[in-house]
Amino acid sequence: MKILIVEDNERVSNFLKKGLAEAGHTIDHADNGRDGMFLAVSEPYDAIIMDRMLPGGIDGLGIIVALRKDGNKTPILILSALSEVDDRIQGLQSGGDDYLVKPFAFGELLARLDAILRRAQEPNTESSLSVGDLNLDLLSRKVTRAGKSVTLQPREFKLLEYLARHANQVVTRTMLLENVWDYHFDPQTNVVDVHISKLRQKIEASPAKQMLRTIRNAGYMLTADA
């Protein structure tokens, strides 16, 4: 992925460039607001890491506000030493997708980047998903199977939504942990199995109408096929 870093602290920017390059990303860097704004509007980026306090006539929040006003939807992670709750609220309300306070752990920065990139890639135009006779209303968050209502807890709905978006595909346990629970490590619990079991009981009226399959040594698959 191509990432823009707008950071005037040389030590921090060098640390970020080295770590992100080792993670396989392509990096551009600006050390002031003027150059950061120029790059942000002239090059396509998968994500931007933005410091708040910058020299060059425009600060980080000013850049974000200008980009959003122009319709630029590039995911932006704000990186700042300003750590008060009001500072974070201001950053997010200005159009930032996430806010990380300095000093920070590089592993957390990578995880937060992954999270905002996933959210940006998720389709947000459809209002419903259907797999066979199973329907999910994404606005009301209601589920029906063959016209009958299925009551799900919030986490169960999120799990079913992810499975439905990947219908007829094998979804691994790791994929579910990362995208449904936002875990970037294996907590060594059976949380996935427990929720799959509960979900299966709720959406399958009988064994003959099985939709949620366990694929041995691979993962799970939601399918309309009997």
Image (spheres, helix red, strand yellow):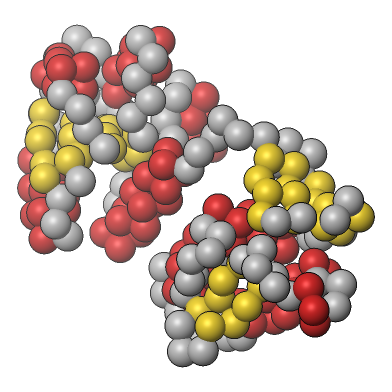
Residue displayed at 79% across by 39% down: 140
Instruction: Answer above or below: position of 195 versus 2.
Output: below
Q: Is residue 89 left or right of residue 113?
A: right
Q: Residue at x 11, y 45 (%)?
A: 26
Relative to 178, residue 98 above or below: above
Whole-percent x, y for residue 11 in the image: 10, 47
Residue, far right: 148
Q: Residue furthest bottom?
A: 217
Residue 59's x, y, as percent? Answer: 27, 19
210 or 105: nearer the viewer:
210
Front one among 93 and 11: 93
Residue nearest the observer in this picture, 40 or 118? 118
Asked where in the image residue 34 lies, by quadrant, the reply is top left
Q: Position of residue 93 (x, y in %)?
A: 51, 24
The residue positioned 24% from the left and 13% from the top of the image is: 58
Q: Is residue 172 left or right of residue 199?
A: left
* Residue 125 in sight: yes
Q: How many marks?
A: 0
Q: Position of residue 46 (x, y in %)?
A: 26, 37
Quadrant of the rendered structure where residue 190 is?
bottom right
Q: At x 18% / y 35%, what residue is drawn?
A: 4
Q: Quadrant of the C terminus?
A: bottom right
Question: Does residue 55 show up?
Answer: no
